[in-house]
Amino acid sequence: MMTKVDRNAIKFNQVSIAVVSIAAFLAALPGLAGLLALVLAVGTARSSWGVFRAIYQRLVLPLGWLRTNAVDDEPAPHRFAQGVGAAFLAAGWIALVTGVTVVGWALVLLVAVLALVNVVFDFCAGCFVYYQLRRFGVIRRPAAQG
């Protein structure tokens, strides 16, 4: 169902994900990747608990660093994409703590790259997967409210 979605909030979220993922890699901090997975999972399960959303709403907007850019869009594909990112980060963290370092960092960096692709090229890979799954009947269209 179409509703108003703040595209700048989504972009801020994606930049934050990329920055934290890359920082975890550069500093060799698997725990940071695991924490990011948890943050994304919680934000996916309950968007009002999203850490990056809170930072955006309570710091970025009041300071005027960004303005809202509300557009008609579906929030479900974006939530799905964030959940997929959380799953990939969790899998990466598990790989890292079990000694499968190359696979772990590859998964963490994949999340960073896909987040940056979304920011730079306005292409959300997770949203694309969501729409394909919906097209094939794996995911049902959200019921209309009203």
Image: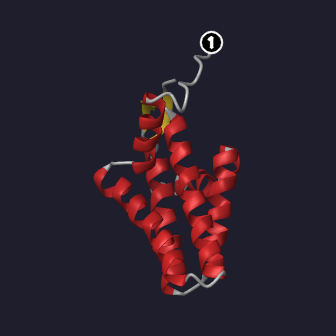
Identified at 38% across, 61% down, the residue is: 116
> Is 38 drawn above or below residue 131 in the view shown?
below
- Residue 133 in percent (x, y) is at 47, 36
State left or right for residue 110 relative to residue 27. Answer: left
State left or right for residue 144 relative to residue 110. Answer: right
Identified at 50% across, 49% down, the residue is: 9
Residue 23 in view, yes or no: no
- Mark 1 lies on a secondary structure that is loop
Residue 38 in view, yes or no: yes
Q: Nearer the viewer, residue 146 or 44?
A: 44
Kindly indicate the quadrant of the structure image that contains residue 109. Answer: bottom left
Identified at 62% across, 57% down, the residue is: 40
Kindly indicate the quadrant of the structure image that contains residue 93. Answer: bottom right
Residue extending furthest toward the top: 146
Question: Three-letter amino acid code at disc 1?
Answer: Gly
- Residue 48 in percent (x, y) is at 68, 45
Identified at 32% across, 49% down, the residue is: 122
- Residue 10 in percent (x, y) is at 48, 49
Q: Nearer the viewer, residue 95 or 113?
A: 95
- Residue highlighted by disc 1: 146
- Residue 130 in percent (x, y) is at 47, 39
Residue extending furthest toward the left: 121
How many C-alpha atoms fall within 10 Å of the one at disc 1: few (<14), some, or many (≥20)?
A: few
> Is 1 drawn above or below residue 31 in the view shown?
above
Report the colour scheme: secondary structure
Q: Nearer the viewer, residue 55 or 125?
A: 125
> Is 47 drawn above or below residue 19 in the view shown?
above
Q: Which quadrant is the C terminus positioned in?
A: top right
> Is 89 drawn above or below residue 53 in the view shown?
below
Exactly how many numbered labels are in the figure? Answer: 1
